[in-house]
Amino acid sequence: MKKTVFLGALTVAGLAAGAAAAGTLDDVKARGKLNCGVSTGLVGFAAADANGEWDGFDVAVCRAVAAAVLGDPKAVEFVPTTGKTRFTALASGEVDMLARNTTWTFSRDVDLKFTFVGVNYYDGQGFMVPKELGVSSAKELDGSTVCIQTGTTTELNLADFFRANNISYEPVPIETNAEAQQQYLAGACDVYTTDASGLAATRATFETPGDHVVLPEIISKEPLGPLVRHGDDEWGDVVRWTLNALVTAEELGITSANVKEMASAAGNNPEINRLLGTEGNLGEMLGLSADWSVNAIATNGNYGEIFEKNIGENTPIGLSRGLNAQWTNGGLIYSPPFR
Amino acid sequence: MVTLSDPPRESFRLSQLIYDTRYRSMTIQVVALIGFLILLGWLFSNTMQNLTELGKEPSFRFLSDPAGYDINQRLIDYNNQDTHLRAAFIGLLNTLLVAFLGCITATVLGVIIGVLRLSKNWLVARLMTIYVEMFRNVPVLLWIVFVMAILIESLPAPRAFKGENPSATMKVFDTVAVTNRGIYVPEVQFGRDAKDDKGEYLDEPTGWRTGLGDFPVGADPDNPSCESYFASEGPMAGEPGPGCGRFQISLDLMAIILVLMAGFYVSHRIKTRADHIQEATGERPTTWYLRLGVIVIPLAILFWAMGTYLTYPSIERGFNFQGGTHMRNSLIALWLALSLYTAAFIAEIVRAGIMAISHGQTEAAAALGLRPKRIMSLVILPQALRVIIPPLISNYLNLTKNSSLAIAVGYMDITGTLMGITLNQTGRELETVLLGMLIYLTISLSISAVMNWYNNSVKLVER
Ligand SMILES: N[C@@H](CCC(=O)N[C@@H](CS)C(=O)NCC(=O)O)C(=O)O
């Protein structure tokens, strides 16, 4: 008699544990903190400073989401993940979202069951070599030793590239960017390959960046963007439209400087009004407060501001907007309308 | 008169299960077992349900998909179009390689250090104590990373060997290159007189010292790389190309092993005969040259007949040394760190084993006129082995399991391939980790079985 009760209780517990996976938005609100998976350290994208404050292009996405959901850009718990651990961390619920230069691919979307909410950086894989090697094209790399981060698309592209060109290489698998940098600088590998943005960011931290060249070949498409688990569309929408809000803000000229003022009263551009919550109830539809996007934009500014501050041409990393310019300027950055 | 009657037969009551000490422990065990099984069942069904809800029903089909990634150290042929299963197998071989090398080195080092720690020489004994304490008390991961860092930072890169005035030179008569990518040593090759791809002799032809070649297991006549294996004429006829068959067995190596085993067997027979003569006459015939000869001479003849030659590493053009065998940094770092670390534990076990043999044995042996070295090898160590082997097994197991830290230095073992890249690229956490656990379990049980067998063969024969 007692045993059946016990068994019943266990089954219920099992069901409950199974069902607890849904409702990330509620979880985050209840917790009062967003768990955001970032890289272990890539200056410009995600790196902790001496005080443990995280900063960077990917970190800004986490902060914007925290600001939109919780009203506080500081309410983020940053979880450093390597290329290898990131997906397990997200799938197991250890983090609510990943913003960690992660490439949107078919298998990650369909087979690994993640939802990419958009693209915040259009990238491609490149190669970096020391200048003294005198290499000018990736096709000359036959027989070289190549440092790669394991668990990345980089690894697969590299194998494809060398096979397609019928040349050989010796892979040196490495877990984090920091280790790769150490091995590369010590000459334990001839080449370091990863996303071109990552190469630029890594090279910027070298003592003599001028001694290293990034080869002209870009061997893949690497659309990098934030992702969440499959199956929780409410939460996916929140992250997707927070990113879109940052992009639209740049398109409409809303900046961290003027957002508060523009949001104080409805203006004569209806899309701005809808975005900033002075008209309509977009925030409510997302399950957020009316000033969700104001908070997100006020945190680090719009997409363009975030780009310029962290990785733009006036930073040591010095990336130009290129493909990542607004569509109005010939780039690919394009947000669906707020309507 | 005393009447003996049977004690009253008790009828069994349910409450006895709890109140009767004869049954109570049984009841508790049964309840605990049921509870444990329920817990297991719950964990299992919960996992299944959660995975299904995520849309990731457990399935092992991914194992037959192309892996897509390259592995640097391959003991058998592999390329990135092979399956995840084969990639896992490459990793398994790498695990076994480093575990095997590590166990041997750790044992040799451990025995030497353990014996030396008991040395009467104060300095030697203290040095060994320092060694043991240093290695035993720092986590092995740190040693692995530390050794790797030293190898990378302190050794010259291959390009330092190039050019007019190279800043680094090769060692041992210009045959060994020590670089920060690993050590390149000469490689033994067979078939000096073999013809190359174009049908030219590699050396002045005698025509028959071609080596035995490789045997492809599971060769498929339809596989293009097997074409030359099934061809009966033309250059390279009979030699399988890379990728032909599931794996290839070097017949040259097999021949060497066979001749070597035969040599050892004959050598052993000579020793037994010498023992008999010594027992019968009290004189031991000198046999060392015979025993050495039966091993070395057939081997030398075989080497000559197979056309054995060495290829040396060299770097003129290109990024890396060509020719020779490349022992990668990652292997050296892992092997060295694991051996040094485990040797410290083995040294303590050896020391304990020796100290467990009563001093009377030493004195008795000395009274018979044995010299200290022989006392150690003939009297003390054989007895100490009984004490040493069981804890030695667990150290071998530890070493093997510790080799899973390989990824810290980028050594592609089973953890790096199956439970690393494959897991990450396919998102099959549960399946890969389960498989990995099963593999480590199998390796560990096999090591235990072999060592237990050895233990049985050295233990005291009790009468
Ligand atoms: N985009 C690729 C590669 C991502 C990647 O690992 N990037 C490196 C360098 S750009 C990184 O973020 N490293 C930081 C770290 O080691 O944590 C992918 O998604 O697989």
Image: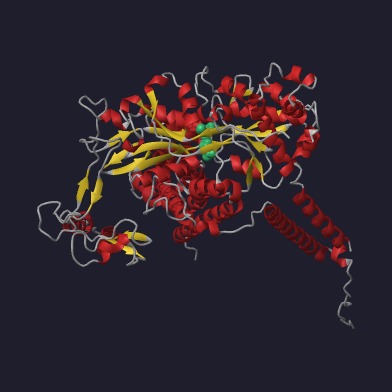
Task: Report the front residue among B151 and B429.
Answer: B429
Give the image location of residue B242, x and y in percent: 31, 56
Q: Which corner quadrant holds the N terminus of chain B?
A: bottom right
Residue shown at 37%/47% (left/top)?
A: A163
Residue shown at 53%/47% (left/top)?
A: B425
Q: Is residue A176 visible?
A: no
Task: Report the front residue among A336 and B182.
Answer: A336
> Coloring scheme of the render?
secondary structure
Residue shown at 51%/19% (left/top)?
A: A313
Residue A315 position (above or below residue B298) = above
Residue B174 position (above or below residue B262) = above
Give the image location of residue B100, x and y in percent: 42, 50
Q: In which quadrant of the rendered view does residue B235 lie?
A: bottom left
Q: In which quadrant of the rendered view does residue B10 lie?
A: bottom right
Task: Give the side of residue B353 with respect to residue B318, left or right.
Answer: right
Q: In which quadrant of the rendered view does residue B46 lie?
A: bottom right
Task: Give the side of residue B290 with respect to residue B253, left or right.
Answer: left
Give the image location of residue B72, x and y in percent: 39, 44
Residue A312 position (above or below residue B433) = above
Give the image location of residue A97, x and y in percent: 66, 37
Q: How many marks?
A: 0
Task: Report the front residue among B352 and B226.
Answer: B226
Q: Is residue B312 visible?
A: yes
Task: Report the front residue among A270 and A172.
Answer: A270
Task: Give the side of residue B159 with respect to residue B207, left or right.
Answer: right
